[in-house]
Structure formats: structure tokens, C-alpha cells
Image (cartoon, coloured by chain):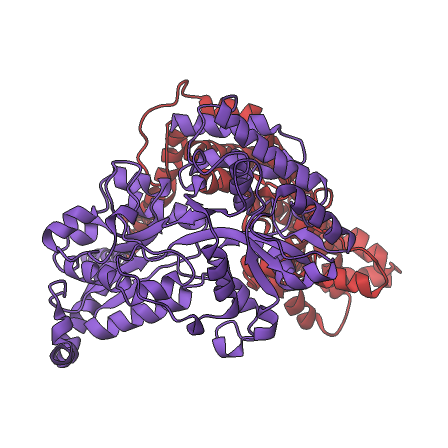
Chain colours: A purple, B red
Amino acid sequence: MMKKRMMAAMLAGAMVLSMTACGNSGNTGNTGSSDNAAGSTATKEEAPAADAGQDAPAAEPAASAGPVELVVTTTFAGEDTNAQNYKDAVKDWEAKTGNSIVDTSATADETFKARVATDFETGSEPDVLFFFNGADSNSFIEAGKVVPIDEIRAEYPDYASNMNDDLIPASLVDGKRYAVPANGIWEAMFVNMEVLEAAGVAKPGADYTMDQFKADCEKIKAAGYAPIAAALGNIPHYWWEFAIFNNQSPATHLEIPENAGDEIGQTWVAGMNDIKELYELGYFPENTLSATDDETFAMFTEGKAAFLLDGSWKVGGIVGACQSDPNDPATLDVEKLDKFDVTYVPGKGDRKATDLIGGLTSGYFITRKAWDDPEKRAAAVDFVQHMTSDELVPKFAQHGASALKNAPDVDPAQFNILQVKAMDMMAGATSLTGVMQDIFSGDCRVSTFDGMPEIVTGRVAAEDAVAEGLEIYHNQ
Amino acid sequence: MGANIYRNKKPALVFLFPAFLFMVVLLYYPFFKNIINSFMQLKQLGAAATEFNTPWYTNYEEMLHDPHVWTSVKNTIIMMLVTLVGQVGIAIVLALMVDNISRGKQFFRTVFFFPIVISATALGLMFNLIFLYDKGMVNQFLEALGKQNLTDWKAEGIALITMMAPVMWQYVGFYFVILVTGLNNISDELYEAARIDGATTLQRVRYISIPLLHNVICTCSVLAVTGALKVFDLPWVMFPKGMPLKTTFLTGTYMYYQTMETKNVDYGAALAVLIVVLGVVLAKVVNAIFKEKDY
């Protein structure tokens, strides 16, 4: 009997232990990684030692003692123009240092932002992240979970020393600089020239106005095409930004109204009503309220829609759509790509068409967790310095802006035809104003972003939607 | 001495404890914590609750005035009816037909069951392509038949049908297999006796198969109704954020939308409580309606 009891107790104990072990294996993926890292340290020590001889000059003060594994998350994924550049740059850094990167990058959308915020809240943040430096980063800056550039420079004086500090955006929380920018962004209007030609419409120029735009849309619609490729039920962001901007000026665009009734608030309401007017005129695709952004983008690239408001990152998406293999640049159909162009968003009132939206809206943050880890600190600093070096930044910035002190000359021959057109367009810009939705961020945008279908169909008054969003913003 | 081992229940308790512990940690603790969270202010997912809402029942009051809550409850009830009629109903018909064929039973079992093993997300993506506005399979087919204009299968008036059809299609095979197994358990002697008495095929179905399947049908109905409350992935992939015009929300997708998209986490917690209450009430109602019989 005693034996049986003992046996039962042992079996129960074994069961508990095995379940605990199962739990551990999931929960401590990190531990496992550490062990692996330790293992790899031992095995890789020989390889870096060999490299160390070759790369001795590059051993720099930021080099870490042994191979380290950094968790990095960025927005260089999916259709982002720089997704491949990022992969190449990471590969180079890994080869140079012997360290490794666990990449958790994802497409920059609201889900990604929520994931990053949750990671910080739950203490599972990455070591380095390339993320928005506007209001989206407020929560983890307030919590002291990322390290200011000045604090890093106290130990690593060369950190971001190749950047013009005046161009590095400061945090909205405390005015300190945290994120080292790599590449700037702009938002503008892409055009499908094939559709424009079929409808007898000329390419919009630097003095393009909203009235001219409406007249052109009418012609395009009459020719049987959708004038504007936009999914208002999914991604109304760009129209939202420019419609409001069109009722303001570059000087006032970044001011958040107190309420929907004040002077600036009324410009927001007017902006929403401008989108409503375009919807009622039938300039958006028939399925604009139920389509996804991918669907309307496909309409644009397949020659069924004429205009597309989007950002500099979309250049890569259009180029990809002109390749028979999206992962192989050698398969680019140059003739097809030449049918796309990029120009200015039609202006109105005090906003000229050449007043653009854009700037250095993202950058590399080093988290406090990595900074406080003696094994990771140097590697994290070295990684950011590598990704923001004079050699790599121009690759990422391409036709956009950068914060480099000494931006090297770029050879236009290395760019495709759409990138060259983008550079020409940027050369004519008269101002670059920051992205207001980066400040007016989070759930305050829901009533006018997710609520855009209700606004354009008249189920919710623009004034009410704006008022609801502003109330949430001011209560945050 | 030897018989005592069967009377001593303590070893069984020791074996039950780990599973009980897992249930407490992973189900009951989060469940009660969620109820508390529904009364608190939660700024972000994963953030600690700061203080109670004022008044503490704010979220429940807001629920009463939130038109999307009523839309999602209405859609969920429609989904239940669709699963009852569309899934269990079609499964009964298919099971009876397959039971009456002499060859290929195994083939049909496999074919009808197959959609169950495919991930709902993958199915959602597939049906997105089928119902795509431009160059979708259905619209291309209609175009080939001479239809001039494209149909937006995700437009307001028709979106619910487009959403529910794939859900219905996916689970028919599940109930079909349960019902076929139930039919196999009915003794052949009963059918033989009925045949000798001159009963037609329809009469054998009406007076033997259906009555003897009653308990299996009840089980399927309870599973279908409670399952409808949990449907999430396929509708969310096809109609994210309740598109179009927030008309396709189900209770599950609306709770997810509030929690993950609008970051109204405590309101999402309150919606989760509503889902549980709805589930318990409906399960009781269904159990009362589809009461099993003893034969």
C-alpha cells in the first residue's frame, strides 16, 4: 500500500514538474535564447576573433564584449520602400560584429502601434526600436522606458554626432531628443498618367488648385475611371490630413483646437466636409466604404483610378507592383513604372499645392532595458550608429529628407524613374509641415478616422465627430 | 486490504490538482479580474488600472446607449439562427442523404469535413478573394454571364450575408460528421423491420432516423448556438472594424475593436462580461428548448 502511495505521489510530482517544464519552455524563450546566446558566444568567439583582426579599426568604443542578441522592431516591413535596405543593413551589421538581431518589424499601422505600446506596458519591449517620435511615443517616454540622446552621449560622445541636432525632433513630453532619425517622409499625390491621358487630363502642376482638381475628377469620372483611389472605410488618413491642411496654412496646421467651435476647430470641420463633398460627387471608388487600402491601391496600379494620396514609402509599393517578382528588382518593368508620376496635392486658400506634409517623423530609440543591460548597452549603441551612419542614411532617405550634417551627393543613376520624379517634386516644395495626426494620436482619432464613413454618408455630422475626438484628446 | 485502494480517493485529488491550478490561473483569475477591470479606468492594454470609473458602472451605462452594441448583439443572434438552420439543418440533410447511399460514404465524410481543418483566417482571406469587388471570382463569373456592373459584396445591404455564408459553410462538415455517427448507431434491424412493413425511404427517415437522432441534434444545436457566440476570426478578416459603416460587428469583434483598435480597454472588458452573460443566458434557453430525451 505504501509503495502504491509513493508511486502515486511520484507520478503526481512528475506530472506537475513536466507541466511546469512546459510552462517554462514557453515563458522563458528568452532564457533559452540566452543559453543559446551563451552557447553561440562560446562557438562564435573564434569567428569574431578572426574578424576582429580584420575589423580592428572598426572595433570603435561602442563595440560589445562578445556576441549579443538584440531584439529590434522597426516599420521597415511589408511594402515599405526600405524593407530590403533594412534587411541588408542588418545582415552587414551582424557579419561585422558577430552579434545577432531578432527582428520583430511590422507594417506601420495602428495594430503595430498598439503592439509596441503593449510591449512597453508589459515589460517585453525590444532593445532598439525605429518608431514614431510624435504622440505615439509619449506613453513610453513618460514611463522613462527609453534613453535620451544626451544621456547616451555622456558615455558615447560620438553617438548621432553625424546628425544636425536642430533637425532631430524633440519629444512632446519633455522636449528632450530620444530618436535618431534615419530618413524623412513626405506625403503627396501619385498619379497614373495612363488614366489621365485616357481622360484628356494634364499632369497637375505646382499651382494646382482644388477647383481644378474637381474639374479633372469630373472628366476622369466621365471617361469611366475612378478619379481617387482611396478606401475611406479603411485608410482615410491622408485625405484627413490634407483636407484639414487645405483649410489652414503651414503656420497653423500643427495647432490642436480647443473645441470644434473655435477658429481652428472650424477648419477641421470644413476639412471633413470637403471629403464629404468629394464623396457625394462620386470621385471615390464605388466600394470606398467597404474596400481595404490594398484593394484601392491595386485599382490605382492597374489603371482603374487616377489619383492616390500617400506617403514616400509608397514609391516602393508602386515599384513592387511594376515587377513581375516583387522581391526581385531585376524584373522591374521600366515602361510600366514610367506611367506613374508624383505631384502636389491640390491647394486651397492659404495652403499652396507646393506646401507639403512630411518631416523626420521616426527614429531609432534605445530602450532603458537594453541600456541598463551591461551586455547589450554597447551593442545597441553600435547598432543605431551603424543604421544612422553617413553611408546608410542616404540609402534609406532616397528622395526624402535626412538630418545628416554632411549629406553625401547622391548619384541619380542609382534611382529608378519614379524616385527621380519624386526628387524633382520635392525640389519644388515651398514648405514641409509636420504630420498633425502624429500629435493628434490614439483613440482621439477614432471618431474621424474609423468614423469617416459615417461622416461622408451624413449619418454623423462632421462637427460632432470632430468635437468627440477633441474631447477625448483633451481628457487624455 | 487490496480493496481499500478503490475506496481511497486521495490519489485522484493529487492528479486533479495540477489541472485545477491551470484552470484557476489561466481562466478563473483572468475572468474575475476582467469583471473588476470593467469598472476601472484602463488607459492601455497591459497597463495597471488606475482608479474606479465615476460612477463605477459608467461602462455598463454607456453600453445601453451605444448603438454598435445593439448592432453586434442583433448580428450575433442572427448568426445563431444561421448556424442553427444553415449549419445543423444542412448537416442533417447531408447526413441523411449520405446514410442512404451504399458506396462513397467515407469519401463524402472526408470532403464535407475538410473545411474544418483549414484555419479560419486562411478561409477569410480566400473568401476575400472570392468576393473581391474588382476581379473577384463571383464578379468575374457574373461578368461572364453578361452582368454589366460589378457588385460590391461587402456593401451595407449585403455584407451580413457575405460574412455569414463562409462561417456557415465552414462548420457544416463538423455537425455532419457528428450526425452521421449518430445515424450509424441506429440499429439496422429497425430499418429492416420497417422495410418489411412497407415503409418508404421518407417514412423511414421521418419515423426512425429523425426521432432516434433527437439527442444528437440537441447536442449539435447547443454546440452551434454557443459556438456562434465565439465566432471571431473569419468575420474580422473579412470585415475588419465592422466595415462597412460598423454594420457587421458581432459581440466578439466589437469587443476586440474597442480593446485593440480604439484602446478603450475597460469598455472592452465590460463588453466581455456582456458576452459571458449572453452566453450563459442563451445556453440555458437552448438547453431548455432542445432538452434531451431518454429512450
Dividing the picture into quarters, in which one does residue A141 lie?
A: top left
Please state the horizontal and vertical placement of residue B225, each as a whole percent of the image: 61, 43
User: Is residue A303 found left or right of A396 in the rendered image?
Assistant: right
The single residue placed furthest to the right in the displayed view is B198
Placement of the C terminus of chain A among the 4 image quadrants: top left
Task: Using the image as rendered, state which of residue B207 and residue A242 is in the foreground.
Answer: A242
Please state the horizontal and vertical placement of residue A387, each as a whole percent of the image: 28, 63
Task: Using the image as rendered, state which of residue A292 and residue B52 is in the foreground.
Answer: A292
Task: Using the image as rendered, state which of residue A2 and residue A392 is in the foreground.
Answer: A392
Q: Is residue A437 above or below residue B150?
A: above
Please state the horizontal and vertical placement of residue A48, each as a whole percent of the image: 15, 76
Dividing the picture into quarters, in which one does residue A454 lie?
A: top right
Placement of the N terminus of chain A among the 4 image quadrants: bottom left
User: Is residue A320 found left or right of A381 in the rendered image?
Assistant: right
Residue ID at (26%, 46%): A166
User: Is residue B138 found left or right of B268 in the rendered image?
Assistant: right
